Image (tube, grey):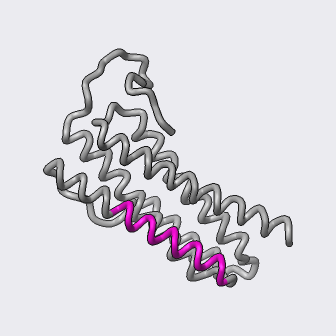
Amino acid sequence: MALDKDFHPTGTTNTDVLSDADVIDTLNDLLESSRDGEYGFTAVAEHVKAQDIKTLLLRHADECRGAAAELQTHIRQLGGKADEGGTASGALHRGWVAIRATLSTYTDHAMLDEAERGEDAALARYRKALKQNLPATVRALVERQAQGAQRNHDQIKALRDALKAAG
């Protein structure tokens, strides 16, 4: 997802990079999203039956934890304080996963639907961040993490679609 350094989504030609405070806010938003991903993948993994799916989901949870640690490091390097916890919408989503898992119609397919929904939210946050004029080192980090979120999304979607076709 390499973007031209002169990319300006608002159509402006302003080449000023965001202030450190704005970059910290953006990174904190992504940090909350990474934590939501970690918690969400873990919650879904608790409810799936197939061991291979559980293993994949727990690996994605670990990747999200690693992404969060990277973001925290960058926030501190910029003199900021990392936000604690995830987002309210992430907590609501995890609650819905737990409710859906208790329903009699619960399936691994349904849990993968929820995991994909969570990754859709993460991708939207990364796309929003990449529309900003971030410093080069931060942009590289955000692009790399966005690519990871896209890979997670695509893997979950492919697995969900395969389960649907098999069932």
Could you say which quadrant of the image residue 83 lies in? bottom left
Query: Could you say which is closer to the camera, residue 63 or residue 161?
Result: 63
> Is 134 placed above or below 93 here?
above
Task: Name the residue rendered at 56%, 82% in the picture.
Answer: 46
Q: Please check the rendered image and state whether residue 116 is part of the magenta-colored stretch, yes or no.
A: no
Give the percent coordinates (x, y) of residue 33.
Answer: 42, 57
Against 6, is 39 above or below? below
Residue 96: quadrant of the picture: bottom right
Left or right of 72? Residue 29 is right
For the view shown, which residue lies furthest in the left direction?
79
**Percent position (x, y) of residue 109?**
73, 70
Q: Residue furthest top?
A: 13
**Percent x, y of residue 42:** 50, 76
Residue 49 falls left or right of residue 92:
right
- All told, the count of numbered labels is 0
Name the residue at 55% across, 57% down: 119
| 82 vs 91: above or below | above
Residue 3 in the image: state x and y as whole percent: 46, 32
Q: Residue at x 49, y 53 (%)?
A: 122
Does residue 52 show up magenta in the picture?
yes
The C terminus appears in which quarter of the rendering?
Answer: bottom right
Report the magenta stretch's main SS: helix
Of 29 and 87, the residue lying toward us: 29
Left or right, 148 with respect to 141, comes to right
The region drawn magenta spans 51-68
